[in-house]
């Protein structure tokens, strides 16, 4: 059994690095894909927000005895993934996809937070040397969750053998 769940709706969003301990009802509600530089990054002023922003969503455990993999198809530029306040991974790579195994940390109800950061960084390269990046074309290092996020749940080997 494999189940694929698109979790693009009902996210809360806030500029800054405040990591909430519960679902932040007062934050702006967004649906993915989303960028926090959609307006200020396109006005030509080179004064767009550079820094961290937090995306949060409540997710439920799909079932018992399943492995659950979070698939983030793009998080620019650096992303840190937290589940119930525990840091699970850091992804440095702009618009490339990555996966995180949530299985060991999942409870029946969970607070998933992804912190993105588009601050200038020497160790994160936005492009291949022969091709211009989006930042080169528009002059902006846009930060966002700019593609779908999916939960993939499948029976674990242990439960499948019972």
Image (tube, rainbow, N blue to C red):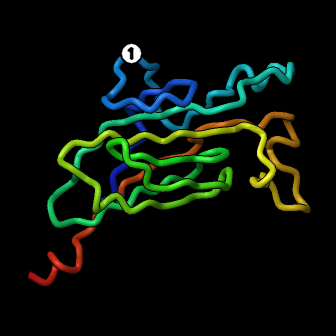
Marker count (numbered): 1
Tag 1's secondary structure? loop
In which quarter of the view is residue 120 placed? top right
Direction left: furthest residue: 162
User: Which image quarter is the C terminus in?
Assistant: bottom left
Give the camera-side residue of 52 and 13. 52
In which quarter of the view is residue 56 placed? top left
Q: Residue at x 80, y 44 (%)?
A: 134
Give coordinates of residue 88: x percent, y percent: 43, 55
Give coordinates of residue 82: x percent, y percent: 42, 46
Answer above or below: position of 138 versus 62: above
Give coordinates of residue 5: x percent, y percent: 33, 52
Give the camera-side residue of 48 and 133. 48
Direction right: furthest residue: 130
Give coordinates of residue 8: x percent, y percent: 43, 40
Using a 10 Å C-alpha cutoff, classify the residue at mark 1 as few (fewer than 14 neighbours), some (14 to 19) or many (20 or more): few
Direction top: furthest residue: 26
Q: Residue at x 34, y 20 (%)?
A: 25
Q: Residue at x 65, y 54 (%)?
A: 92
Direction bottom: furthest residue: 161
Answer above or below: position of 54 versus 83: above
User: Which image quarter is the N terminus in?
Assistant: bottom left
Answer above or below: position of 109 versus 13: below
12 to the left or right of 45: left
Q: Residue at x 57, y 58 (%)?
A: 97
48 to the left or right of 144: right
65 to the left or right of 16: left
In which quarter of the view is residue 66 placed? bottom left
Answer above or below: position of 82 versus 26: below
Where does label 1 land, which residue?
Answer: 26
């Amino acid at each position: 059994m494999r189940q694929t769940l698109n979790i693009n709706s009902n996210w809360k969003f806030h500029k800054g690095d405040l990591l909430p301990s519960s679902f932040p009802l007062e934050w702006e509600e967004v649906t993915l894909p989303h960028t926090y530089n959609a307006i200020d990054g396109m006005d030509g002023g080179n004064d767009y927000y550079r820094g961290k922003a937090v995306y949060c969503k409540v997710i439920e455990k799909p079932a018992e005895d399943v492995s659950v993999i979070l698939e983030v198809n793009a998080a620019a530029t650096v992303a840190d993934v937290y589940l119930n306040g525990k840091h699970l991974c850091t992804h440095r790579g702009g618009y490339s996809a990555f996966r995180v195994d949530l299985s060991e940390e999942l409870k029946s109800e969970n607070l998933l937070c992804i912190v993105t950061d588009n601050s200038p960084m020497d160790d994160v390269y936005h492009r291949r040397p022969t091709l211009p990046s989006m930042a080169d074309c528009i002059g902006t290092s846009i930060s966002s969750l700019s593609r779908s996020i999916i939960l993939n749940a499948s029976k674990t080997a242990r439960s499948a053998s019972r």
